[in-house]
Image (spheres, rainbow, N blue to C red):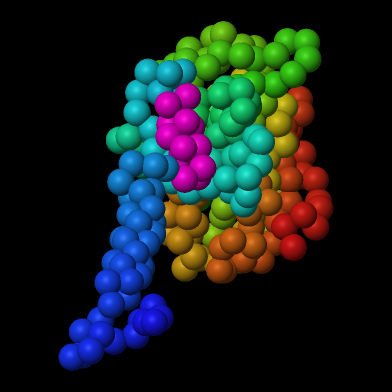
Amino acid sequence: MLEVGDRMPGGGESSQALSRRQAVGLMLAGALALAALPLGGCTTRRERRIMLAEDLLREKYGRDFSVVFEAYGFDTATKPTAYCCAVGEEDLVFRLEFDAVEGSIVRDSYVGRKLGRQVEAVITDCFAGQGIDIASHVVVYTRTYGAGSIKDEDPDITLDDYLLLYEQFSMGASIFLKDTEVDPRKSIEFRFAIIDMYERLKDTLSPISVYIIRSENLEEYREYLLQHPDFYGGIGSIEHRPIDGFWVSVRDLDLVIIEDNFWK
């Protein structure tokens, strides 16, 4: 009796051996077909979440968005964080947190970063008026909690209109100055620039962080700040770290300097 795989007289193979070869071939073909399925239409969880994030933002603001990059655990967290930009605004990146189960936005800083960019222009102008070249990064906190919460999230609102709506607002702001022979703490030009800035912004009461950096690094900071939604706490991400830092505020039209080691 011939076993499977035995050769027939004359060198031929049994029909059973041919059947086995055919079966193996069919199995391999099936495996390859299954492996190709994700490329042919199925999507990964990460891809589905990216599409959800972009759809939620489109529904909220009526324009197209792209996810620039995702935070750690993006495809596993229930409420993941993504960093996004509107199409045509690639240099204005903002933070988005959304509920992947409920399919809803928890919070995003799109309007806050757009307003922040306008605040940056005011800050730059105030310092330029005193002959000081700076880089800055601002996020206006358009959504807070508790009494008197600011909830206006019109993506096309101007800073002037925003200031008319709200007597005061909060923001996270960082200013970067070139290192010079004169300590800004003792500079009359720096003092006038800060007071002018607070007056034009209707005194937000928000303390502002000031960093002193090497003169040759200012352009590097400008480029970096365009692509980062939240600079607070992000000092370590820049290759050339600041060499000094402090907080400033304005009370009763006078400059208040708050020393801290937060910048180290």
Q: Please name whichever residue, 38 or 220, is drawn nearer the observer in this view of the structure.
A: 38
Q: Please name whichever residue, 210 or 26, is drawn nearer the observer in this view of the structure.
A: 26
Decide whether the magenta segment is chiefly helix, strand or loop: helix
Which quadrant does the C terminus fall into? bottom right
- The residue depicted at 56 percent of the width and 68 percent of the height is 239
User: Percent x, y for residue 37?
Assistant: 36, 49
User: Percent x, y for residue 94?
Assistant: 51, 37
Q: Which quadrant of the view contains residue 65?
A: top left
Magenta stretch holds residue 45 = yes
Q: Is residue 147 left or right of residue 82?
A: right
As drawn, which residue projects farthest toward the left? 10
Total marks placed: 0
Establish if 116 lies above or below 135. above
Q: Please name whichever residue, 90 or 35, is drawn nearer the observer in this view of the structure.
A: 35
Q: Please name whichever residue, 213 or 32, is drawn nearer the observer in this view of the structure.
A: 32
Which quadrant does the N terminus fall into? bottom left
- The residue depicted at 69 percent of the width and 61 percent of the height is 244
Establish if 199 lies above or below 36. above
Q: Is residue 54 visible?
A: yes
Q: Is residue 187 visible?
A: no
- The residue depicted at 57 percent of the width and 8 percent of the height is 165
As drawn, which residue projects farthest toward the bottom? 10
- The residue depicted at 39 percent of the width and 42 percent of the height is 42
User: Percent x, y for residue 12?
Assistant: 21, 84
Establish if 26 lies above or below 196. below
Establish if 156 lies above or below 66. above
Q: Which residues are magenta?
A: 44-56
Magenta stretch holds residue 210 = no
